[in-house]
Amino acid sequence: MVGLLTAVGTVVAATWAVGGLLDASSPNRSEAAWKGAAYAEPIRYDVRDGVLHEQESGAAADRELADAWSQWTTIMGERAIEVRSVSVSDDSNESTMASVARDSDDPRIWDAELNMAWATDSDELRRTMVHEYGHIYSLSADDVAVVQGACPTFEFSEGCLAERSILGRFLARFWADDQTGAEAEAATEEDATRKYESEGGADAFVSEYAATNGAEDFAETFATFVLSGPASDVPDGSVVAAKLAFLGNDPATAAERTRIRRELGLD
């Protein structure tokens, strides 16, 4: 599972797509189905064609959750149909705001998790969701697969990266000297901090979390690229500048930035 340790906030806009689940009255978060889910099992919603559907328990999405999910589907665009479920919790003791995990049997299907406890900052919400989409975008069924024998490129729990994939090319350029670190999905926060500090800090990574492993570096860099772009306030000649330029020079990734920014009303 890949995720982002961050905060989340209210949604900026989007078209609600929660057929039959959205209460037209003003939201009362104290009565929301997922409120108070701390220390309990998260409430799992089925997702069909990007739309949340009520579970047998009768749990329905209130306006706040509907807004959050609407923004996420806006960011994912056509690929929102790849998400099968979202598990919603409200646990302030859990620092992970959101995560996505690919199905082990069907590489075209993803499950998501969303912690509404951190629904306080709209900028962090947007960045987190773009980060999580970065995982879906870079670990597609076409770009990573289970192989027999040794993986000739980089290997994650989802499988072996195709050499031509955007993540495979990103890692070949920026993680070639640390393939073990690139693939280190079990890396700790302390591991990430050490790597961040030893390799140049903000000149090398857009955040400390980006130093966790190659997939997180890509997702964090992708979020910065989408929301700030190649002209971000980063030192000329730095590794971060090179990473942002790399994404900007890839036609498909540049097109995704244009689409997301247009649909979020950022341009």
Image (cartoon, rainbow, N blue to C red):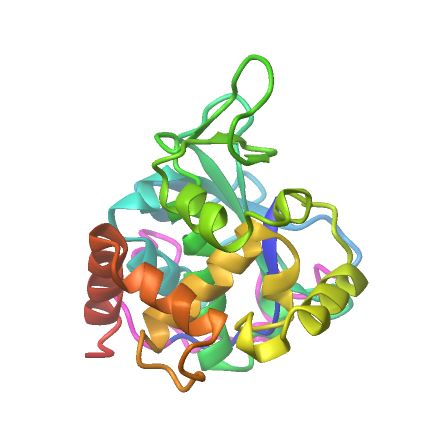
Which corner quadrant of the image does residue 162 belong to?
A: top left
Find residue 66 and report its horizontal and vertical position in percent.
41, 63
User: What secondary structure is the stretch in magenta mostly built from?
Assistant: loop
Residue 29 falls inside the magenta stretch: yes
Instruction: Judge by depth and name the residue closer to the eye, 248 or 1.
Output: 248
Instruction: Judge by depth and name the residue closer to the eye, 241 or 93.
Output: 241
Find residue 106 and report its horizontal and vertical position in percent.
46, 24
Quadrant where the N terminus sits is: top right
- State which region is magenta: 12-38
Judge whether residue 64 can be spotted in this image.
Answer: no
Find residue 68 and report its horizontal and vertical position in percent.
43, 66
Question: Which residue is at a point 20% across and 65% down the rendered structure image?
Answer: 258
Quadrant where the C terminus sits is: bottom left
Which corner quadrant of the image does residue 98 belong to?
A: bottom right
Judge whether residue 262 can be spotted in this image.
Answer: yes
Residue 74 falls inside the magenta stretch: no
Along the horizontal axis of the image, is 213 left or right of 72? right
Q: Is residue 230 above or below residue 169?
A: below
Looking at the image, how many numbered discs can be counted on the residues? 0
Question: Which residue is at a point 52% across and 18% down the rendered structure image?
Answer: 147
Instruction: Judge by depth and name the residue closer to the eye, 103 or 118.
Output: 103
Along the horizontal axis of the image, is 61 left or right of 247? right
Along the horizontal axis of the image, is 48 left or right of 203? left
Q: Is residue 57 above or below residue 130?
A: above
Residue at the top extreme?
148
Find residue 209 and report its horizontal and vertical position in percent.
63, 66
Question: Which residue is at a point 61% across and 47% down the rendered structure image?
Answer: 182
